[in-house]
Image (cartoon, rainbow, N blue to C red):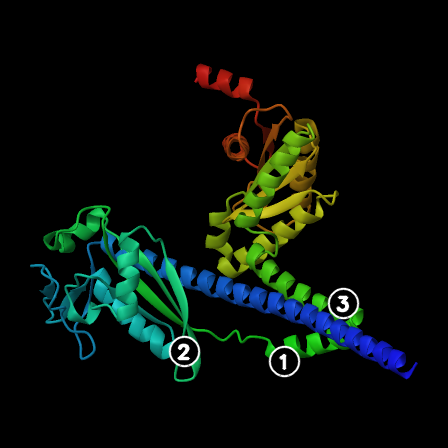
Amino acid sequence: MKYTNFIAFMNLKKNIVYAILIWTTLVAVSFTINYLNAIKEQKRIAIETARCVFDIILTTRMWNASHGGVYVVVNDKVKPNPYLKDPMRDLELDNGLKLTKINPALMTRQISEFAKGKEGIVFHITSLRPINPLNKPTPIEERFLKEFEKGVKERGIFIKRDGKTFYLYMAPLITKKTCLKCHARQGYKEGDIRGGISITLPFVMEMPWLPLVLGHIVIWVVVLCGIVIAGNKLNNAYEELRRQAVFDSLTGVPNRNSLFRRLVEEYRRCQRYSQPLSVIMCDVDDFKAYNDVYGHVKGDECLKKVAQTIRSSLKRPGDFCARYGGEEFVVLLPDTSLEGALHVAERIRANVEKMAIPHIKSPIQVVTISLGVAAAECNTSISHYELIKRADIALYLAKQQGKNQIQPYIESDLKEETVNT
């Protein structure tokens, strides 16, 4: 009996150990999944931030190249570029002031030095065949440049330096026609990858170690309560990140990227459930004149009020409003015919006019909007891009007809007008 009890006790103990091991394994798997998701989100934020910086650098370089370089005053900090072979590199004005031409490469390096001192951001223009020895690639940059030549579009890695975490991002520079003036002698042709720009960002988003560990301890102890608490925290964090990525910072309504994602979803739903889909494109009338008279601060306030009025004019949960760009907004109306969309458009137009925002350059002395409406039926063969284009055409017609009005896109009418014209 004692032996039997001992065996039963040992089996119970073994089962408890197995249960503890199984539960511990499940908690460990949960921790690993959350850790990997956090790393993935960390990488996503890092690469999107780096892409934005790269696009800004590329835009400034394109601006410089489009002007054939820009001239600046020569001083103690700015000297003529010895690697720029241009007979017009240096100019001296009648008053004795000396100017030197800054090409895109030198401009990039100077901006990098400024950004490094102010924000801690470092970017480096480099090439496997650099003209300037300062543009020689580091070993990591050299590896990335060789990968670009094999078709890789971009690279990014986390690095440690002096106990701090940085994100190193690099993308290639494609040879444009304007680049050949300086780089043709190196053997580059239009379309070749002639180098790249690396961006090193100080990365301040730390891994949430303490909440993660404590969360899983709570999960391990109280199971369901811990899962709910940790899940809510993660969901709130991800929701905030998603909100920042999809909303327009000025007006508070969804941005252009959100619009096109939603448009694709609604268009597919329209086809799947045989429902119509309508689009309203809105544009604030004479907005440039408004800015000229009242200033850009008032202009921003005006856009905010118009955006909120458009959004408040939509009654159904499925209706969607987004800022398209500048003073233009787009409204998506699922399961709404052209006739129904025209009613919604009139409500929006009237509500904006009722705000009575003063505008002395407007024919009626207040801010107004023009609207173009287009609809796609369930059996339509047009694409969602064509639907936006049609709404834009109708908006143009509303502007042409005198503004502060609504015009639908009716293909037969537009064809007739084109023939008459």
* Displayed quadrant of residue 142: bottom left
Residue located beneath label 1 in the image: 210
Between 152 and 393, the one nearer to me in the picture: 152
* Displayed quadrant of residue 138: bottom left
Q: Amino acid at mark 3?
A: Val
Q: Percent position (x, y) of residue 414? A: 51, 21
Residue located beneath label 2 in the image: 160
Q: CA distance from mark 1 to mark 3?
A: 17 Å
Q: Amino acid at mark 2?
A: Lys
Mark 2 vs 3, N-terminal side: 2
Q: Percent position (x, y) of residue 264? A: 58, 39
Mark 3 secondary-structure assignment:
helix
Q: CA distance from mark 2 to mark 3?
A: 35 Å
Q: Percent position (x, y) of residue 262? A: 60, 44
Q: Is residue 218 left or right of residue 63?
A: right
Q: Is residue 36 left or right of residue 119?
A: right
Residue in the picture at 65% in, 46% down: 310
